[in-house]
Amino acid sequence: MIDYAIDGDGIATLAWNMPERPQNVIDGESVEAFIAAIGRAVGDPAAKAILVTSAKRDFIAGSDPEWLFAAKDPERILERTLRFHRALRQLENCGKPVAAALPGSALGGGLEVALVAHYRVAAGDVRARFGFPEVTLGLMPGAGATQRLPRRIGIERALPLLLEGRRLGAAEALAAGLVDTVVAPGEERRAARAWLLGRGAGESHQPWDGEGYALPGGAMASPDVQQALMAANALLHARTFGNYPALQNILSAVYEGLVTDIDTGLVAEARYFVRTLLSPQARAMVDTLVFAVNEANRLAARPDGVPTQVYTQVGILGAGMMGSGIAFVTAKAGIAVVLLDTTMEAAERGRSHARDVARRQVERGVLAADEAEALVARIDPSTDYTRLAGTELAIEAVFEDRAVKADVTRRAEAVTDATAILASNTSTLPISGLAEASVRPANFIGLHFFSPVEKMPLVEVIVGRRTSRETVARALDFVRALGMTPIVVNDARGFYTSRVFSSYLLEGMAMVSEGVVPALVENAATMAGMPVGPLALADEVSIELIHRINGQARADLGKAYRPQPGEEVVARMVELGRVGKKAGRGFYDYPAGAAKRLWPGLAEEYPSTARQPAVGSLIERFLTVQAVEAARCLDEGVVTSARDADVGAVLGWGFPAFRGGPISHIRGVGVAAFGAQCERLAARHGQRFAPPPRLEECLR
Ligand code: NAD
């Protein structure tokens, strides 16, 4: 678990080396082993200095969530946390210099262990990441970071690192003060040893344990620091409305811990840590973002008995916004891409887009320059369909037009092998209908990527009426090869994500038509936890596109079509020529060089009522309309698992992660209470709120 060795120079090396795990993690066993190793090194008279490092490629990847969430008893978690604190204090105060050599990533608890060292050396590996991503899972650091980091670099510099959860590359980590030096990969132990034997020999304590220590960047009581804390507090509330207690608890731990000595501060942190860990928000986020996403990534929904498909060459038809993004992620996964468009110029433009994305990733230090070059070289722009021969998969991302899609399907199938898969990236057209143009409908499937492809990890895999199990399995193998997260969805209007997402947009517009002040509509949505209000989002998506989709559904469904109350607002906006952000005018105005602002004319179209609804009732509507639509999708078999419904919602359209997803939300409210809530809202606002008849069964 922890390799212990002592050399001729009197340096005791404690190397994390967890057996049967690709990465070191903080868990019950590794913490105990580390505590024991600390005791041994501290008590060993032959050890003059201590080097903490890892025998694996990375240092420590953070805590094991399974272990973290297995414990339920607050007193026991507190005791265990304080025990680790005491051991880490023993290490930094033992009178021997301590250095950390980080061969790769040090995240969360791993970086906290590194912060205990008097000196940190990081290897400048492009893959290495440093930071405190706990907040992205509703958690907070629990091994001293809220105390050691501000004492090392000052409160103002520490707060964003603790509150934003960003993972920094090695150079950024050096600039941020997380590490003391960056050396060539493989040199980190040597550099750390050189420090221990040289300059470090006389430095065997932390600055905060020494004489005359002053907090960098100004003491707690200084006006600058007080102002920074006040601003951070206000900003936090403005952005999150108290929905993420982890953020508040981090700020409180910093505030309370920094007015006192470090030992008292660590106890304060431990108490906030326990409270955060046991919060329903952390539980919901970890359940969905870790456990459910991991299950989806392991292809839990993959049909059995189909050999794994290895991809060597993929064709992409249409080199526009989506096609070029898909080309990028495919080439990044090491797969050769034929990128096809109607002109060479358009195909080249698609590759240039991929090149730009790669360049930005190199600038951010997350992609090596030679890897970027190889990635771009793997994309072969062309107008020649015969180049598709030999591809295992062709993905079409041409215009959203049935005839154009049918044409490229026929042309691609004419040159590819009988086993090749043809996938459509359509966002609205039913897959079974598009498959009618295919001579091999069993090999036809939907692979719905999200924009921007290189940032959005979700892929909705859409199973058409005639899609074979084998094609589903092989398509899932492709998503896995890309390192993205699939959800499996049956073919239905709007599939899953677009259907539920549009219920959110239309609810916002329904509110506008009822005379709710537009700013209140937008604020209620963000207070519910949605990242962007429905009116701003409709502008982004294009009101015209929403109108077209509504019109298509009306034409396809005929008498069965049930218009939603928000649709008349959509139609009116299109009539007024206010079609969205691209046109520079929608629900918002977009003045050049200034921030967007709500269009004042909206108040004339839809006068505000004298009595405005309570914000809580609007929040309830936003959450319920999405949750009930998601439940309907489960009931109708559009999504086949609650897990996929939650993962798709959180990753696909930004359903509040702290609620775990729409199905977790229903469970949180309680199925019976949720049903009653739906009945009440349906009576007042319409049938869109009516719960599916088998609510209870479908959530099982
Ligand atoms: P786009 O207009 O940016 O790109 C379409 C590309 O297809 C253009 O480069 C065009 O020249 C090319 N093309 C047209 N006809 C062709 C043909 N016969 N052969 C080869 N190439 C042809 O569009 P986009 O935003 O990339 O969308 C493409 C598809 O992806 C659509 O079906 C859309 O619904 C879907 N989609 C879009 C988004 C999004 O956010 N934009 C998200 C998910 C899915």
Image (spheres, grey):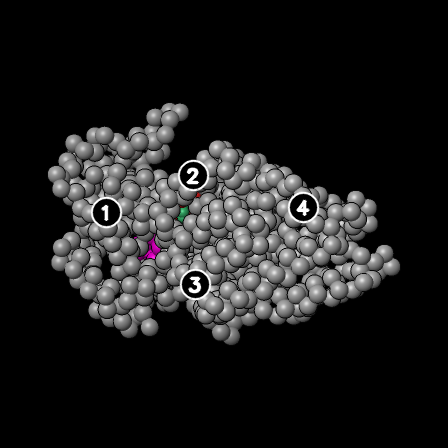
Three-letter amino acid code at the position of disc 4:
Gly
Q: Nearer the viewer, residue 420 or 474?
A: 474
User: Can I make out residue 122 in this image?
Assistant: no
- The residue at which mark 3 appears reads as 278
Discs 1/2, front? 2
- Give the alpha-carbon distance from disc 3 to disc 4, as whole Å: 36 Å
Badge 2 marks a residue whose secondary structure is helix
Three-letter amino acid code at the position of disc 1:
Val
Please state if 558 lies on the left or on the right of 271 as rendered: left
Q: Which mark is residue 210?
A: 4
Judge the density around disc 1: few (<14), some (14-19), many (≥20) Cα neighbours within 10 Å.
Answer: some
Three-letter amino acid code at the position of disc 2:
Met
- Give the alpha-carbon distance from disc 1 to disc 2, as whole Å: 26 Å
Pointer 2 or 4: first along the chain: 4
Q: Which mark is residue 230?
A: 2
How far across and how far down the image is residue 99, in percent?
A: 72, 52
Pointer 1 or 3: first along the chain: 3
Quick check: marks 3 and 2 in contact, CB under 8 Å? no
- The residue at which mark 1 appears reads as 615
- At a point 31% along the width and 69% down the height, the residue shown is 699
Quick check: marks 1 and 2 in contact, CB under 8 Å? no
Discs 3/2, front? 2
Pointer 3 or 2: first along the chain: 2
Q: Which residues are magenta?
A: 493-499
Badge 3 marks a residue whose secondary structure is loop
